[in-house]
Image (cartoon, rainbow, N blue to C red):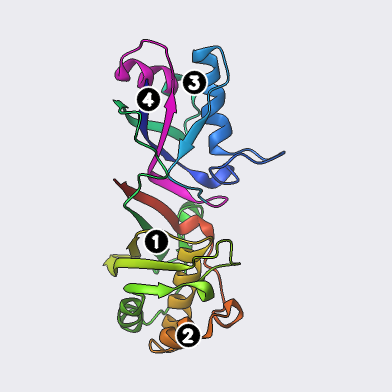
Amino acid sequence: MRYKCIIEYDGTNYYGYQRQPERVSIQEVFENALKIICKEDVKSFASGRTDAHVHAKGQVLHFDSDINMKPESWKKALNSLLPEDIHIKSIEGISDDFHARFSVKSKEYRYFINIGDYDVFFNNYTAYFKDLDIDKMKEAIKYFIGTHDFTTFSRFVEKKDTTRTITDAYIIEHGRFLEITFIGDGFLKYMVRIMVGTLIDIGLHKKKPEDINHLFEAKNRRLTGRTASPNGLYLWKVNY
């Protein structure tokens, strides 16, 4: 039987979703819980990686098991074994042709910036910047919408195909917080954080909104400047 899980996690203490040697990952912790229940190693597959210290409200994964247990029982059993910073929001049986990664149609990422007074208790969950020109940032983010070659907005070219489509991108102010949303068919490594870093530079008047088109054309990561810190980034939702 194949099971689809929606999982949320605080990424502060983890080096990303995917397993890696000698560093604690979300996948490792989740599969350790599965092993206790199933009495054997069980491989899980996620919608994609999240970087070290990045959070998730709606990461999706799947796993296969022959154990005859109701979804609610799976959810209760897994959550009883997982630490408090990882939580299964829902679990359901699903057809075998579903794949958490390859069935994805789009993903939604959100980035949060504290633009009010500095608060140590928000430090792990937002970035902090003062005196940003938010109107310029709102103007600039529209340049990302559409189909583009995002070579400039990736840490390194990990795939030959660097073309992605951003279907929507916008900025909302919530009091002391700035919420930046990107929805697209896929994202390269560090792509969201580099786009946010570029928007921050625009908000600080280090770049202009129209510079984004020139950055697309240049295909040169060195021209974009900062990569926004991971603590403000959330994988918000995965659509199938």
Of the numbered discs 3 and 1, the one sitting upstream in the chain is: 3
| Labels 4 and 2: the sequence-earlier one | 4
Which of the pair 124/36 is nearer the observer?
A: 36
Q: In percent of the image, x 47 and y 47: which residue is there?
A: 48
Element type at mark 1: strand
Q: Tell me if residue 179 comes above or below residue 4 in the rendering.
A: below
Q: Say which element carries label 4.
A: strand
Circle on res. 112: 1
Instruction: Locate residue 92, reporting x and y percent.
Output: 30, 26
Tag 4 or tag 1, which sits nearer the N-term?
4
Q: Amino acid at mark 1?
A: Phe
Residue 81 — which label? Answer: 3
- Residue at the (29%, 45%) spot, across then down: 240
| Distance of label 3 from label 1 (alpha carbons) | 30 Å
> How far, Cα to Cα, is label 2 from label 3?
49 Å
At label 4, the amino acid type is Arg
Part of the protein shown in magenta: 51-78
In front here: 144 or 83? 144
Place residue 91 in its image quadrant: top left
Q: Secondary structure at mark 2?
A: helix
- The dot on residue 2 is 4
Dot 2 or dot 3, earlier in sequence: 3
Which marked residue is nearer to the observer: mark 2 or mark 1?
Answer: 2
Above or below residue 142? Residue 105 is: above
